[in-house]
Amino acid sequence: MQLGLIGQAIQHSSAPDLHRRLGRLIGVSVSYTLFDALIAPPPSVPAQVDALRSQGFRGVNVTYPYKEQALALADSAGEGARLVGAANTLIFGADGVHAENTDFTGFLAGYRATLGERAPGRVLMLGSGGVGKAVAFGLGQLGAEEILLLDLDRAKAESLADQLAAAGFAARAVAPEALTALAGECDGLVNCTPIGHEKSPGCPLPGSLIRADQWIFDAVYVPARTEFIALAEAAGAAVISGVSLFVFQGVDAFKLFWGQPARAAEVDAQTPALYRHYHQQLLGGAGG
C-alpha cells in the first residue's frame, strides 16, 4: 500500500513511522513517502495528487498549508472535512478522490478514550488556526456548552466563531485580557497554539488558573509532556495528551487507506500500544 504526506517542513514527521508500524502489526506492506514542498515544490497540489494517483498510490495525508486545497479537489468528503472546511486525508478510489479530516475524528476518539462520556461543558480554547479548527468542531460535536476562542489575531477567532455558529455550535471570540476571568468560568482548557512545543517552550496560561475539576487538552505533542500538561497533572485536572490526537488521527487515516471496514477492529486494537510507544518516544521531544 503506497501512502504519502504532502506539506511543508515535514522532514521530521512521525507519520511515516506510524503507518509503516501499523502495517507491520497487521501484516500489510506499507510504503510512506514525504513530499515536502520546501524541498521539491510541486507544480500544484492538484497536479501532484493526479501524479500520485497515476502511480498507484492508495492515498495521502495532507498538512500545512494545503488542507483547504485538498478538500477543494476532492470528489466527495466525510462529515469532518465538510464541517471543518479542510481535509488532512485523501483516499484514492475508482470513484475519484475522497476527503476526510482525521484530526476531527481523532480528537473525538482521543477525548472519549480519556474522558468517556464526560460532557465538555464550557471550553476556553487558545489558538484558532490549523488543527484548532478541527478541535473546535470536535468540541461542538461532543456537545460543548460554549466554545470561547482566544487568539492574538482577533479576526481569526471571530471567523472561526462564525463558522462554528453557522454549524449550530455555540461559540464566541474573546479578548486576551479576559483570560484569567474566563479560565475560572470554564470546564475545559484547550491549547491549540504552538506554545509548549520544544521550539516554543512555555505554558499558554498561568498554571494557577488550572483546577482539579477541569479537563485540559494540549495539541502540542513534541514533547509529549508539555509544561501545560505537567501543571495540569499537578493540579489534579484530567489530561488529554496531544499524543492521543497524533495516534488516533493516524489510526483513522490508516483504516481509510486500507479500506477494510470489516477488519477495522484489528487496527483499533493496536491503538493502546501505539500510544504507549509514541508517548515514551516523544517525552524527550524527538519526532514531530
Image (tube, grey):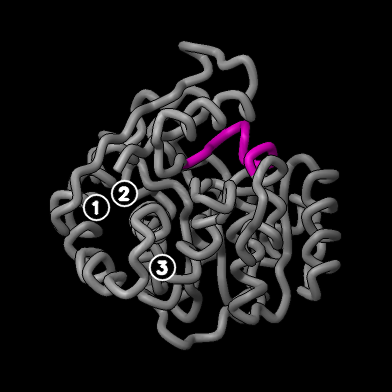
Asked if one can make out residue 230 in the rendered structure from this viewpoint, the answer is: no
Residue at the spot of label 1: 279
Marks 3 and 1 sit apart, C-alpha to C-alpha, by 14 Å
Q: What element carries label 1?
A: helix
Question: Is 126 inside the magenta-drawn segment?
Answer: no
Q: Earlier in the sequence, mark 3 or mark 1?
A: 3
Q: Give the range drawn in magenta.
A: 61-70
Image position, residue 133 (x, y; %) = 66, 54
- Vertical order, 52 against 26 (above or below): above
Residue at x 65% of width, y 78% of height: 144
Q: Earlier in the sequence, mark 3 or mark 2?
A: 3
Q: Earlier in the sequence, mark 2 or mark 1?
A: 2
Question: Is 69 inside the magenta-drawn segment?
Answer: yes
Residue at the spot of label 3: 110
**Disc 3: CA contacts within 10 A as few (<14), some (14-19) or many (>=20):** many
- Vertical order, 15 against 227 (above or below): above
- Vertical order, 71 against 7 (above or below): below
Image position, residue 95 (x, y; %) = 57, 53
Residue at the spot of label 2: 224
User: Where, by quadrant of the figure, is residue 130 drawn?
Assistant: top right
Closer to viewer: mark 3 or mark 2: 3
What amino acid is at disc 3? Gly
Asked if one can make out residue 84 in the rendered structure from this viewpoint, the answer is: yes
Q: Is mark 3 on a helix, strand or loop?
A: helix
**Disc 1: CA contacts within 10 A as few (<14), some (14-19) or many (>=20):** many
Residue at x 23% of width, y 50% of height: 278
Q: Do the residues labelled 2 and 1 touch (CB within 8 Å)?
A: yes
Residue at x 41% of width, y 79% of height: 115
